[in-house]
Amino acid sequence: MGNLLTISDLQRDEIEEIFDVADAMAEINRRRIPKVPTLRGQTVATLFFEDSTRTKLSFDTAAKRLGADVMGFSVSSSAVKKGESVRDTIETIEAMGVQAVVVRHRSSGVPLQISRWSDAAVINAGDGWHAHPTQALLDAFTIRNRFDSLDGLHIGIVGDIVHSRVARSNIEAFTKLGAQITLVAPPTLLPARMDWPVEISHSLDDVLEDLDVCYLLRVQNERISEALFPSLREYTSMFGLTTRRADRLGPNAIIMHPGPMNRGVEIAGEVAERPNSLVTDQVANGVSIRMAVLFLLLGAPRESLIGGEGERSVEVVPVSAGESGGSR
Ligand code: CP
Protein backbone atom coordinates (compact mmCIF):
# COMPACT_ATOMS: atom_id res chain seq x y z
CA MET A 1 0.00 0.00 0.00
CA GLY A 2 1.24 3.50 -0.85
CA ASN A 3 -1.94 5.31 0.15
CA LEU A 4 -5.33 4.20 1.44
CA LEU A 5 -7.97 6.15 -0.48
CA THR A 6 -10.76 3.61 -1.05
CA ILE A 7 -11.45 -0.06 -0.43
CA SER A 8 -10.99 -0.51 -4.20
CA ASP A 9 -7.26 -0.07 -3.51
CA LEU A 10 -7.28 -3.37 -1.61
CA GLN A 11 -7.51 -7.01 -2.64
CA ARG A 12 -9.11 -9.52 -0.29
CA ASP A 13 -5.72 -10.87 0.81
CA GLU A 14 -4.55 -7.33 1.62
CA ILE A 15 -7.64 -6.75 3.79
CA GLU A 16 -6.91 -10.03 5.56
CA GLU A 17 -3.30 -8.95 6.09
CA ILE A 18 -4.56 -5.72 7.70
CA PHE A 19 -6.75 -7.85 10.00
CA ASP A 20 -3.77 -10.04 10.96
CA VAL A 21 -1.73 -6.97 11.86
CA ALA A 22 -4.75 -5.49 13.68
CA ASP A 23 -4.89 -8.67 15.81
CA ALA A 24 -1.31 -7.93 16.89
CA MET A 25 -2.26 -4.30 17.55
CA ALA A 26 -5.24 -5.39 19.65
CA GLU A 27 -2.84 -7.43 21.77
CA ILE A 28 -0.71 -4.31 22.28
CA ASN A 29 -3.85 -2.35 23.16
CA ARG A 30 -4.64 -4.84 25.95
CA ARG A 31 -1.28 -4.28 27.63
CA ARG A 32 -0.93 -2.23 30.78
CA ILE A 33 1.16 0.23 28.78
CA PRO A 34 -0.30 0.04 25.26
CA LYS A 35 2.62 1.52 23.41
CA VAL A 36 5.48 0.35 21.17
CA PRO A 37 8.26 2.40 19.53
CA THR A 38 7.59 1.03 16.04
CA LEU A 39 7.04 4.39 14.33
CA ARG A 40 9.36 6.42 16.51
CA GLY A 41 10.77 9.37 14.56
CA GLN A 42 7.87 9.43 12.09
CA THR A 43 5.20 12.13 12.02
CA VAL A 44 1.53 11.66 11.20
CA ALA A 45 -0.54 14.76 10.34
CA THR A 46 -4.29 14.58 10.97
CA LEU A 47 -6.09 17.12 8.78
CA PHE A 48 -9.79 17.23 9.49
CA PHE A 49 -11.56 19.81 7.36
CA GLU A 50 -14.84 18.28 8.58
CA ASP A 51 -15.90 17.41 12.13
CA SER A 52 -15.03 14.07 13.68
CA THR A 53 -14.81 12.47 17.09
CA ARG A 54 -14.12 8.74 16.55
CA THR A 55 -11.95 8.84 13.44
CA LYS A 56 -9.72 11.73 14.49
CA LEU A 57 -9.19 10.57 18.06
CA SER A 58 -8.54 6.98 17.01
CA PHE A 59 -5.95 8.01 14.39
CA ASP A 60 -4.28 10.27 16.97
CA THR A 61 -4.30 7.41 19.48
CA ALA A 62 -3.14 4.84 16.92
CA ALA A 63 -0.16 6.98 15.86
CA LYS A 64 0.86 7.71 19.46
CA ARG A 65 0.61 4.05 20.49
CA LEU A 66 3.03 3.22 17.70
CA GLY A 67 5.43 5.90 18.94
CA ALA A 68 4.86 8.41 16.11
CA ASP A 69 4.59 12.15 16.61
CA VAL A 70 1.17 13.57 15.76
CA MET A 71 0.72 16.91 14.03
CA GLY A 72 -2.88 17.88 14.77
CA PHE A 73 -4.64 20.38 12.55
CA SER A 74 -7.81 22.17 13.45
CA VAL A 75 -9.42 24.02 10.57
CA SER A 76 -11.20 26.41 12.91
CA SER A 77 -7.90 27.78 14.24
CA SER A 78 -5.83 27.50 11.04
CA ALA A 79 -4.96 29.75 8.10
CA VAL A 80 -7.70 27.95 6.12
CA LYS A 81 -9.96 30.46 7.87
CA LYS A 82 -7.98 33.21 6.09
CA GLY A 83 -8.55 31.53 2.74
CA GLU A 84 -5.42 29.35 2.44
CA SER A 85 -5.99 26.62 -0.13
CA VAL A 86 -5.82 22.88 0.54
CA ARG A 87 -2.75 22.65 -1.68
CA ASP A 88 -0.87 25.38 0.17
CA THR A 89 -1.92 23.83 3.48
CA ILE A 90 -0.52 20.46 2.41
CA GLU A 91 2.73 21.97 1.12
CA THR A 92 3.13 23.88 4.39
CA ILE A 93 2.63 20.76 6.49
CA GLU A 94 4.86 18.66 4.29
CA ALA A 95 7.67 21.22 4.53
CA MET A 96 7.77 20.49 8.26
CA GLY A 97 8.36 16.81 7.54
CA VAL A 98 5.49 14.32 7.71
CA GLN A 99 5.39 10.69 6.61
CA ALA A 100 1.60 10.24 6.65
CA VAL A 101 -1.36 12.56 6.15
CA VAL A 102 -4.79 11.54 7.41
CA VAL A 103 -7.43 13.70 5.73
CA ARG A 104 -11.16 14.21 6.04
CA HIS A 105 -12.94 16.65 3.76
CA ARG A 106 -16.55 17.33 2.85
CA SER A 107 -15.71 17.10 -0.88
CA SER A 108 -15.27 13.74 -2.59
CA GLY A 109 -11.85 13.31 -4.18
CA VAL A 110 -9.82 15.66 -1.97
CA PRO A 111 -7.67 12.82 -0.49
CA LEU A 112 -6.91 11.59 -4.03
CA GLN A 113 -5.93 15.10 -5.08
CA ILE A 114 -3.70 15.46 -2.00
CA SER A 115 -2.00 12.16 -2.84
CA ARG A 116 -0.97 13.70 -6.19
CA TRP A 117 0.61 16.68 -4.46
CA SER A 118 2.23 14.89 -1.56
CA ASP A 119 5.05 12.39 -1.08
CA ALA A 120 3.57 11.34 2.26
CA ALA A 121 1.26 8.33 2.58
CA VAL A 122 -2.30 9.66 2.33
CA ILE A 123 -5.13 8.02 4.26
CA ASN A 124 -8.71 8.93 3.48
CA ALA A 125 -10.59 9.51 6.75
CA GLY A 126 -13.83 10.25 4.90
CA ASP A 127 -14.48 12.36 1.79
CA GLY A 128 -17.96 13.61 1.02
CA TRP A 129 -20.34 10.79 0.10
CA HIS A 130 -17.49 8.90 -1.56
CA ALA A 131 -15.47 6.70 0.80
CA HIS A 132 -14.48 5.98 4.40
CA PRO A 133 -12.15 3.00 4.02
CA THR A 134 -10.88 2.68 7.59
CA GLN A 135 -14.48 2.67 8.86
CA ALA A 136 -15.21 -0.24 6.52
CA LEU A 137 -12.07 -2.06 7.66
CA LEU A 138 -12.92 -1.68 11.33
CA ASP A 139 -16.52 -2.75 10.68
CA ALA A 140 -15.44 -5.84 8.74
CA PHE A 141 -12.83 -6.62 11.42
CA THR A 142 -15.53 -6.38 14.11
CA ILE A 143 -17.78 -8.79 12.18
CA ARG A 144 -14.89 -11.16 11.47
CA ASN A 145 -13.96 -11.20 15.17
CA ARG A 146 -17.54 -12.20 16.07
CA PHE A 147 -18.23 -14.76 13.32
CA ASP A 148 -14.62 -15.78 12.33
CA SER A 149 -15.39 -14.92 8.69
CA LEU A 150 -17.76 -12.79 6.63
CA ASP A 151 -18.17 -15.56 4.05
CA GLY A 152 -21.88 -16.29 3.57
CA LEU A 153 -23.11 -13.84 6.22
CA HIS A 154 -26.24 -11.83 5.46
CA ILE A 155 -25.63 -8.16 6.29
CA GLY A 156 -28.43 -5.60 6.13
CA ILE A 157 -27.26 -1.98 5.68
CA VAL A 158 -30.20 0.12 6.73
CA GLY A 159 -31.07 3.74 6.12
CA ASP A 160 -29.53 6.71 4.40
CA ILE A 161 -27.49 4.91 1.73
CA VAL A 162 -27.41 7.77 -0.78
CA HIS A 163 -25.51 10.22 1.43
CA SER A 164 -23.30 7.60 3.09
CA ARG A 165 -19.60 7.13 2.39
CA VAL A 166 -19.72 4.44 5.09
CA ALA A 167 -22.29 2.47 3.09
CA ARG A 168 -20.24 2.73 -0.11
CA SER A 169 -17.03 1.53 1.54
CA ASN A 170 -18.79 -1.17 3.55
CA ILE A 171 -20.54 -2.56 0.49
CA GLU A 172 -17.14 -2.92 -1.19
CA ALA A 173 -15.40 -4.42 1.82
CA PHE A 174 -18.18 -6.80 2.89
CA THR A 175 -18.62 -8.02 -0.70
CA LYS A 176 -14.89 -8.64 -1.14
CA LEU A 177 -14.96 -10.70 2.04
CA GLY A 178 -17.83 -12.90 0.83
CA ALA A 179 -20.89 -11.46 2.56
CA GLN A 180 -24.35 -11.15 1.03
CA ILE A 181 -25.74 -7.63 1.40
CA THR A 182 -29.26 -6.27 1.47
CA LEU A 183 -29.68 -2.49 1.36
CA VAL A 184 -32.80 -1.51 3.29
CA ALA A 185 -34.05 2.01 2.61
CA PRO A 186 -36.85 4.06 1.15
CA PRO A 187 -36.33 4.72 -2.59
CA THR A 188 -35.50 8.37 -1.83
CA LEU A 189 -32.49 7.35 0.27
CA LEU A 190 -31.01 5.05 -2.38
CA PRO A 191 -28.79 6.25 -5.25
CA ALA A 192 -30.60 6.58 -8.57
CA ARG A 193 -28.10 4.19 -10.18
CA MET A 194 -26.41 1.29 -8.43
CA ASP A 195 -24.11 -1.34 -9.88
CA TRP A 196 -23.37 -3.09 -6.60
CA PRO A 197 -23.98 -6.85 -6.16
CA VAL A 198 -26.65 -6.28 -3.50
CA GLU A 199 -30.31 -7.00 -2.86
CA ILE A 200 -32.67 -4.10 -2.20
CA SER A 201 -35.55 -4.01 0.26
CA HIS A 202 -37.86 -1.16 1.15
CA SER A 203 -39.01 -2.91 4.33
CA LEU A 204 -36.85 -3.61 7.39
CA ASP A 205 -39.61 -5.84 8.75
CA ASP A 206 -39.32 -8.12 5.71
CA VAL A 207 -35.61 -8.88 6.14
CA LEU A 208 -34.98 -8.49 9.88
CA GLU A 209 -35.25 -12.13 10.92
CA ASP A 210 -32.84 -13.29 8.21
CA LEU A 211 -29.97 -10.94 9.11
CA ASP A 212 -26.70 -11.91 10.79
CA VAL A 213 -25.72 -8.25 10.99
CA CYS A 214 -28.12 -5.32 11.22
CA TYR A 215 -25.94 -2.32 10.29
CA LEU A 216 -27.74 0.96 10.88
CA LEU A 217 -26.67 4.19 9.20
CA ARG A 218 -27.03 7.63 10.65
CA VAL A 219 -29.70 9.84 9.12
CA GLN A 220 -27.41 12.61 7.86
CA ASN A 221 -29.48 15.70 8.41
CA GLU A 222 -26.52 17.92 7.50
CA ARG A 223 -26.35 16.39 3.99
CA ILE A 224 -30.11 16.27 3.37
CA SER A 225 -31.20 19.44 1.60
CA GLU A 226 -34.72 18.39 0.66
CA ALA A 227 -37.49 16.39 2.27
CA LEU A 228 -36.57 12.79 1.40
CA PHE A 229 -39.00 11.29 3.89
CA PRO A 230 -42.10 12.82 5.46
CA SER A 231 -40.77 13.13 9.02
CA LEU A 232 -38.23 11.58 11.38
CA ARG A 233 -41.11 9.89 13.18
CA GLU A 234 -42.23 8.25 9.96
CA TYR A 235 -38.64 7.23 9.16
CA THR A 236 -38.33 5.57 12.58
CA SER A 237 -41.66 3.80 12.19
CA MET A 238 -40.46 2.21 8.91
CA PHE A 239 -36.67 1.87 9.25
CA GLY A 240 -35.71 2.46 12.88
CA LEU A 241 -34.40 -0.44 14.97
CA THR A 242 -36.97 -0.12 17.72
CA THR A 243 -36.98 -2.43 20.74
CA ARG A 244 -39.78 -4.45 19.17
CA ARG A 245 -37.80 -4.95 15.95
CA ALA A 246 -34.57 -5.72 17.82
CA ASP A 247 -36.44 -8.49 19.68
CA ARG A 248 -37.08 -10.17 16.32
CA LEU A 249 -33.39 -10.45 15.36
CA GLY A 250 -31.94 -13.96 15.42
CA PRO A 251 -30.20 -15.19 18.62
CA ASN A 252 -26.69 -14.68 17.16
CA ALA A 253 -27.40 -11.53 15.16
CA ILE A 254 -25.45 -8.39 15.95
CA ILE A 255 -26.29 -4.70 15.73
CA MET A 256 -23.79 -2.14 14.41
CA HIS A 257 -23.69 1.60 13.84
CA PRO A 258 -20.71 3.75 12.75
CA GLY A 259 -21.67 6.64 15.04
CA PRO A 260 -22.57 9.25 15.88
CA MET A 261 -25.98 7.74 16.62
CA ASN A 262 -29.29 9.58 16.45
CA ARG A 263 -30.83 7.71 19.37
CA GLY A 264 -34.55 7.40 18.94
CA VAL A 265 -34.32 7.86 15.16
CA GLU A 266 -32.40 5.04 13.43
CA ILE A 267 -31.80 3.13 16.68
CA ALA A 268 -33.65 3.08 19.99
CA GLY A 269 -31.46 4.18 22.91
CA GLU A 270 -32.11 0.93 24.80
CA VAL A 271 -31.22 -1.17 21.73
CA ALA A 272 -27.84 0.58 21.43
CA GLU A 273 -27.00 -0.68 24.95
CA ARG A 274 -27.93 -4.35 24.36
CA PRO A 275 -25.22 -7.05 24.58
CA ASN A 276 -25.56 -7.78 20.86
CA SER A 277 -24.92 -4.11 19.99
CA LEU A 278 -21.23 -3.87 19.03
CA VAL A 279 -21.04 -0.09 18.74
CA THR A 280 -18.30 0.32 21.37
CA ASP A 281 -16.40 -2.73 19.99
CA GLN A 282 -16.36 -0.90 16.64
CA VAL A 283 -14.77 2.13 18.29
CA ALA A 284 -12.16 0.01 20.11
CA ASN A 285 -11.37 -1.95 16.96
CA GLY A 286 -10.95 1.35 15.12
CA VAL A 287 -7.76 2.02 17.06
CA SER A 288 -6.30 -1.42 16.22
CA ILE A 289 -7.24 -1.13 12.55
CA ARG A 290 -5.78 2.38 12.24
CA MET A 291 -2.59 1.23 13.96
CA ALA A 292 -2.39 -1.59 11.41
CA VAL A 293 -2.96 0.76 8.47
CA LEU A 294 -0.29 3.21 9.69
CA PHE A 295 2.10 0.34 10.37
CA LEU A 296 1.68 -1.15 6.90
CA LEU A 297 1.70 2.17 5.03
CA LEU A 298 4.79 3.42 6.80
CA GLY A 299 6.60 0.17 6.15
CA ALA A 300 7.65 -0.61 9.70
CA PRO A 301 9.36 -4.00 10.19
CA ARG A 302 7.22 -6.74 11.77
CA GLU A 303 9.85 -7.40 14.44
CA SER A 304 9.35 -3.89 15.79
CA LEU A 305 5.90 -4.86 17.04
CA ILE A 306 7.35 -7.30 19.51
CA GLY A 307 10.28 -5.08 20.31
CA GLY A 308 12.84 -6.55 17.89
CA GLU A 309 16.57 -6.62 18.50
CA GLY A 310 17.71 -3.53 20.30
CA GLU A 311 14.16 -2.39 21.05
CA ARG A 312 13.25 -5.02 23.57
CA SER A 313 13.69 -2.81 26.59
CA VAL A 314 11.78 0.17 25.20
CA GLU A 315 8.19 0.49 26.38
CA VAL A 316 7.32 -3.04 25.27
CA VAL A 317 5.50 -4.67 28.13
CA PRO A 318 4.78 -8.39 27.92
CA VAL A 319 1.23 -9.37 28.78
CA SER A 320 0.98 -11.57 31.85
CA ALA A 321 -1.92 -12.61 34.06
CA GLY A 322 -3.49 -9.60 35.68
CA GLU A 323 -1.73 -7.07 33.50
CA SER A 324 -4.18 -6.90 30.64
CA GLY A 325 -5.98 -3.59 30.49
CA GLY A 326 -8.94 -5.22 28.78
CA SER A 327 -10.57 -4.06 25.59
CA ARG A 328 -10.11 -0.39 24.92
N1 CP B 1 -17.86 6.98 12.22
C1 CP B 1 -17.25 8.18 12.09
O1 CP B 1 -16.64 8.49 11.07
O2 CP B 1 -17.38 8.98 13.19
P1 CP B 1 -16.72 10.43 13.33
O3 CP B 1 -17.45 11.35 12.40
O4 CP B 1 -16.94 10.81 14.79
O5 CP B 1 -15.28 10.33 12.98
Image (spheres, rainbow, N blue to C red):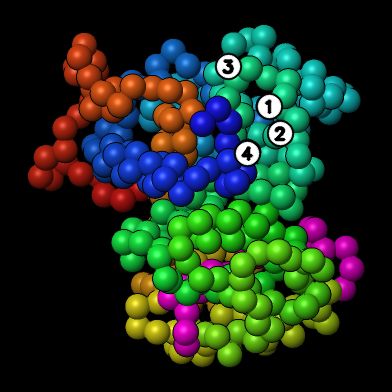
- Image quarter of residue 29: top left
Q: Is residue 175 above or below residue 291?
A: below
Q: Residue at x 51, y 60 (%)?
A: 174
Residue beneath disc 2? 112
Q: Assess mark 4: CB under 8 A from ligand 1?
A: no
- Please indicate, yes or no, whether residue 245 appears anywhere in the rendered image: yes
| Mark 3 nearby-residue class (10 Å; few <14, some 14–19, many ≥20) | many
Q: CA distance from mark 4 to mark 2?
A: 7 Å
Q: Is residue 297 magenta?
A: no
Q: Residues within 10 Å of mark 1 (few under 14, many from 20)?
A: many
**Residue 115, numbered circle:** 1
Q: Circle 4 is placed at which residue position? A: 5
Q: Is residue 224 above or below residue 98?
A: below
Q: Determine whether label 1 and label 2 are within 8 Å by CB.
A: yes
Labels in figure, total: 4
Distance of label 2 from label 3 (alpha carbons): 17 Å
| Residue that appears at 51% across and 90% down | 244
Q: Which dot, 4 or 3, sits closer to the camera? A: 4
Helix, strand or loop at label 1? It is helix
